[in-house]
């Protein structure tokens, strides 16, 4: 079953994507998060396998979803996109660094960033973060109604998210997942 209105969380990992996913679930959306098999499909440019899965859900966050925002925009013309961000690239990098110390080297990081561990090239990672966010903003600059930029650390909560999604604000506290 193809769900009509797709909502893609397109922030990089360690930008509050799990919090966004929890919000999607609370709002009653069918949801798909990280999927390593689909990240490998992305690396092989097998987008049809990814679209087959994206047809089945309403909302998405974490890998591989941010890497295909342009393709999803074309595939699902009514889709909306949410860019989760950190206060700056240094804050994001510190979070990614701490996370990598817990998980060790991963193939997912190698696919996305070109390195197994962020400490192999901190400047590359920070530049990747800044360039990625700038590219997203530039891509949607002529269609601002399709993109919401949020930063949970900067105080964004239910009001902005629900207004963008045209959903009522839940009568529960805003969930912060993996808050550091």
Image (tube, rainbow, N blue to C red):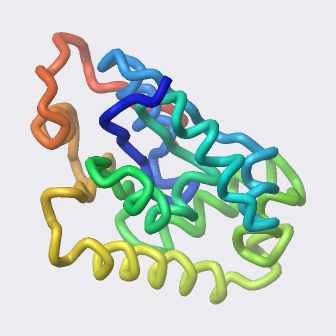
Q: Nearer the viewer, residue 112 or 68?
A: 68
Q: In this view, does 23 lie above or below 18?
A: above
Q: Tell me what residue is drawn at x 19 percent, y 16 percent.
A: 170
Q: Tell me what residue is drawn at x 66 percent, y 58 percent.
A: 47
Picture coordinates of residue 127, whole percent (x, y): 54, 86
> Left of 168 or right of it: where is 161?
right
Picture coordinates of residue 4, whole percent (x, y): 33, 33
> Left of 7 or right of it: where is 144?
left
> Left of 121 or right of it: where is 172?
left
Q: In this view, does 137 lie above or below 16?
A: below
Q: Tell me what residue is drawn at x 44 percent, y 68 percent.
A: 70
Pick out the residue farthest to the top.
171
Picture coordinates of residue 173, whole percent (x, y): 25, 18
Picture coordinates of residue 80, whole percent (x, y): 29, 49
Kindly indicate the quadrant of the structure image that contains residue 146.
bottom left
The number of discs equals 0
Kindly indicate the quadrant of the structure image that contains residue 110.
bottom right
Q: Is residue 169 above or below residue 7?
A: above
Q: Tell me what residue is drawn at x 41 percent, y 20 percent.
A: 25
> Left of 113 or right of it: where is 151?
left
Q: Nearer the viewer, residue 70 or 165?
A: 70
């Amino acid at each position: 079953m193809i769900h009509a209105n797709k909502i893609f969380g397109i922030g990089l990992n360690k930008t509050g994507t799990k919090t966004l996913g929890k919000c999607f679930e609370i709002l009653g959306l069918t949801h798909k998060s990280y999927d390593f098999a689909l990240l490998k499909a992305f690396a092989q440019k097998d987008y049809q396998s990814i679209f087959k899965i994206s047809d089945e859900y309403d909302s998405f966050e974490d890998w591989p979803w941010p890497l295909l925002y342009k393709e999803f925009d074309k595939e699902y013309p009514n889709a909306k996109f949410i860019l989760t961000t950190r206060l700056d690239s240094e804050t994001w990098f510190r979070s990614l660094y701490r996370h990598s110390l817990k998980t060790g080297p991963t193939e997912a990081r190698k696919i996305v960033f070109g390195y197994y561990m962020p400490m192999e090239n901190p400047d590359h990672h920070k530049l990747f973060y800044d360039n990625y966010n700038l590219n997203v903003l530039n891509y949607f600059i002529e269609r601002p109604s399709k993109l919401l930029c949020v930063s949970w650390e900067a105080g964004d909560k239910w009001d902005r998210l629900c207004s963008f999604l045209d959903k009522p604000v839940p009568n529960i506290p805003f969930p912060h997942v993996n808050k550091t």
